[in-house]
Amino acid sequence: MIKRLMILALGLIVLFAAMPVLLTLAAWVIAGALGCTLNEGGVHACVLFGHDIGGSLKTMFVSHWFAYMTIPGAVAALVVWIVVALILLVLRRWRRRQTL
């Protein structure tokens, strides 16, 4: 149970760090597939199913700037994760020695 929680926590930390870059890539792929112009300079019209998603695409496209916040946060969370993992490892070995 604890092993699964630790793996899940690690996955969430990596996802938290990578989310701004993934959003930027998704905006780039969507704009490319729809043949829309996408840049940081302004909002350009981009129609999908009759709705203009240009503003949303621009917001997604410039979200890579949030990486300056999410990556240091993820590094701090990773340090905490490593400390917890080491404590759990030491406790497991200590319990094994106690049962012998």
Image (cartoon, grey):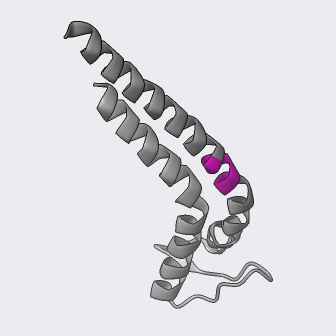
> In the image shown, does 26 or 67 lie closer to the viewer?
67
Q: Residue at x 68, y 61 (%)?
A: 67
Q: Residue at x 33, y 26 (%)?
A: 2
Q: Is residue 98 above or below residue 47?
A: above
Residue 51 belongs to magenta span = no
Going by the image, does 98 lie left or right of 32? left
* Residue 53 coordinates in the image, percent (x, y): 60, 71
> In the image shown, does 93 or 57 lie closer to the viewer?
93
> In the image shown, does 34 or 4 lie closer to the viewer?
4
Q: Quadrant of the C terminus?
A: top left
Question: Which range of residues does the magenta coloring cover?
Answer: 70-75
* Residue 12 coordinates in the image, percent (x, y): 47, 45
* Residue 94 coordinates in the image, percent (x, y): 35, 17
* Residue 84 coordinates in the image, percent (x, y): 50, 29
The quadrant holding residue 44 is bottom right
* Magenta stretch: dominant secondary structure: helix
Q: Residue at x 62, y 72 (%)?
A: 57
Q: Is residue 27 above or below residue 2?
A: below
Q: Residue at x 58, y 55 (%)?
A: 17
Going by the image, does 47 lie left or right of 97? right
Q: Is residue 38 above or below residue 83?
A: below
Q: Quadrant of the N terminus?
A: top left
